[in-house]
Amino acid sequence: MMTYFLFLIPGLLLSLWASYKTKSAFNKYSKVRSATGLTGAQAAERLLAYAGITDVEVVRSSGFLSDHYNPMTKKLALSEPVYASPSIAAIGVACHEAGHAIQHKVGYAPLKLRSALVPTAGIGSKFGYAALMIGALAQIPSFVMIGVGLIGLILLFQIVTLPVEFDATARAKKLAVEQGILMDQERVGMNRVLNAAGLTYVAAATATLLTMLYYLSFLTGRD
């Protein structure tokens, strides 16, 4: 039990801290209106127009910070606190998602790879943790190894996700100011929101890695 906590608690704490930082930064800068008064949806549409993207639809989505770009349906979904808000936080998130649409248009390789890995990551998520639990409780090493391999598919997806997210953030930071969506002095707020959000992806990958290492130590401890 002590070994379990030694391996998994750091990842859990990092995830909680990243989530807190993201919500804190978003809540703070969601109260700060941008000088241009553009809403999140308008900011995203402006970046799409700049990139010559005419086949992506900006739509509303339910849920808090459920914003995402779907390259299969070519829909850029913005949550309610982002879609209609003229805040710095909303514009930062919207521009980040528009960054993904731009990645798709230019054929950004890591985005292509991440899209290809979605089915395998889904398999890992569906069966991996169950195999680990069964293997550990029933003392069946082969099940643990299968579980570790399946969780490895999730980790691979999360690792590939990192450059995709960081690149979309870099595009958002650059283009939001260049295209006059945010003033240069408003960049600090956007940076804090997007940097905090990026940390959640690092935390998720770290937690998955530590889970794999814990169960590998379980196998080693049997020798």
Image (spheres, rainbow, N blue to C red):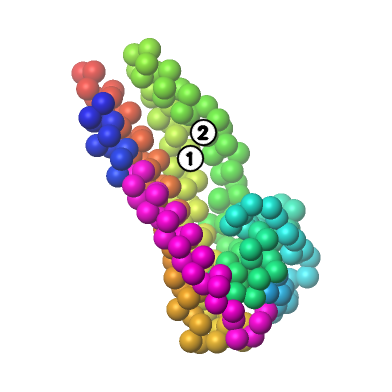
Label 1 neighbour load within 10 Å: few <14, some 14-19, many 20+: many
Residue 131: give x, y in percent of width and height.
46, 22
In the displayed structure, 14 sits above or below 2; it is below
Residue 114: give x, y in percent of width and height.
56, 50
* Label 1 SS: helix
Q: Which residue is mark 1?
A: 154
Q: Are marks 2 and 1 in contact (CB under 8 Å)?
A: yes
Specify the quadrant that holds the C terminus: top left
Q: Nearer the viewer, residue 178 or 102?
A: 178
- Please state which amino acid type lies under the numbered disc 2: Gly
Q: What secondary structure do most residues of the magenta stretch adopt? A: helix
Residue 218 located left or right of residue 84 = left
Q: Which residues are magenta?
A: 11-38
Determine the residue positioned at 64% across, 65% down. Answer: 82
- Res. 20 image quadrant: bottom left
- Please state which amino acid type lies under the numbered disc 1: Ile
Q: Which residue is mark 2?
A: 124
